[in-house]
């Protein structure tokens, strides 16, 4: 996976001509910085249901293993943001904005929970122009 991932990582980080699939609010950036200082490298995963609903979860890197064919839609502050493969099929034409709210989310497994915070994603559909320039996704193999 690494030889494939490195060029794509470079593309995701450095291509201003491409449309990002995910952005991050300043509030979420500050919380991510705080969590990284406390826990080290992070990762995000948004599942398609069950006990955590569709709330994005933040884990220590390697603390959760994406399933086969789950989609990594981009990087948030340098950390991978993965989406459940089935959920991605529904949301592949939507832009994600990662935000954070005060309160306890439905899952409680995410690293921000003890801080009284919960990550949330705001969605909007891509425009026709954005769809033509979408950044690629990485599928877990």
Image: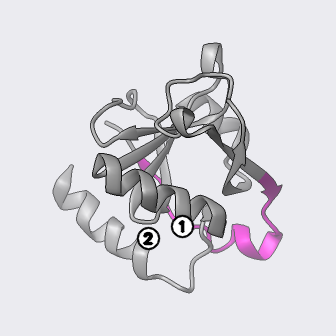
Residue ranking furthest to the bottom: 16
Q: Quadrant of residue 87?
A: top right
The picture places residue 20, in percent across and down from the top left corner, at 59, 69
Range of magenta residues: 123-138
Q: Residues within 10 Å of mark 2 (few under 14, many from 20)?
A: many
Which comes before the other along the chain, label 2 or label 1?
A: 2
User: Does residue 43 appear to the left or right of 114 in the view shown?
Assistant: left
Q: Is residue 11 left or right of residue 40?
A: right
- In the foreground, 101 or 65: 101
The image position of residue 5, as x and y in percent, is 27, 59
49 lies left or right of 84: right
Residue that protrudes farthest toward the front in the picture = 115
Numbered label attached to residue 51: none
Marks 2 and 1 close (CB-CB < 8 Å): yes
| Residue under numbered circle 2 | 12
Q: Secondary structure at mark 1?
A: loop
Q: Nearer the viewer, mark 2 or mark 1?
A: 2
Residue at 52% over, 33% down: 114
**Residue at the location (52% across, 40% down)?**
112
Q: Position of residue 55 (x, y in %)?
A: 65, 33
Quarter containing the C terminus: top left
Residue tagged by mark 1? 135
Q: Kindly report the distance in space between the C-alpha atoms of the residues bearing marks 2 and 1.
A: 7 Å
Q: Is residue 56 left or right of residue 137?
A: right
Number of marks drawn = 2
Q: Nearer the viewer, residue 128 or 120?
A: 120
- Is 52 rendered above or below residue 39? above
What residue do we see at 38% from left, 29% from top?
Answer: 68
In this rendered view, identify the residue nearer to me: 107 or 131.
107
């Amino acid at each position: 996976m690494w030889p494939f991932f490195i060029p794509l990582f470079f593309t995701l980080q450095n291509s201003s001509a491409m449309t990002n699939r995910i952005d991050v609010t300043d509030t979420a950036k500050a919380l991510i910085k705080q969590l990284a200082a406390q826990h080290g490298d992070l990762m995000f995963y948004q599942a398609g249901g069950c006990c955590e609903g569709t709330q994005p979860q933040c884990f220590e890197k390697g603390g959760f293993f994406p399933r086969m064919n789950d989609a990594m839609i981009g990087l948030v502050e340098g950390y991978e943001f993965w989406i459940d493969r089935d959920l991605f099929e529904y949301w592949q034409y939507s832009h994600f904005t990662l935000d954070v709210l005060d309160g306890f989310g439905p899952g409680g497994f995410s690293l921000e929970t003890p801080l009284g915070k919960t990550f949330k994603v705001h969605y909007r559909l891509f425009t026709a122009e954005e769809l033509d320039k979408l950044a690629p996704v990485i599928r877990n193999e």
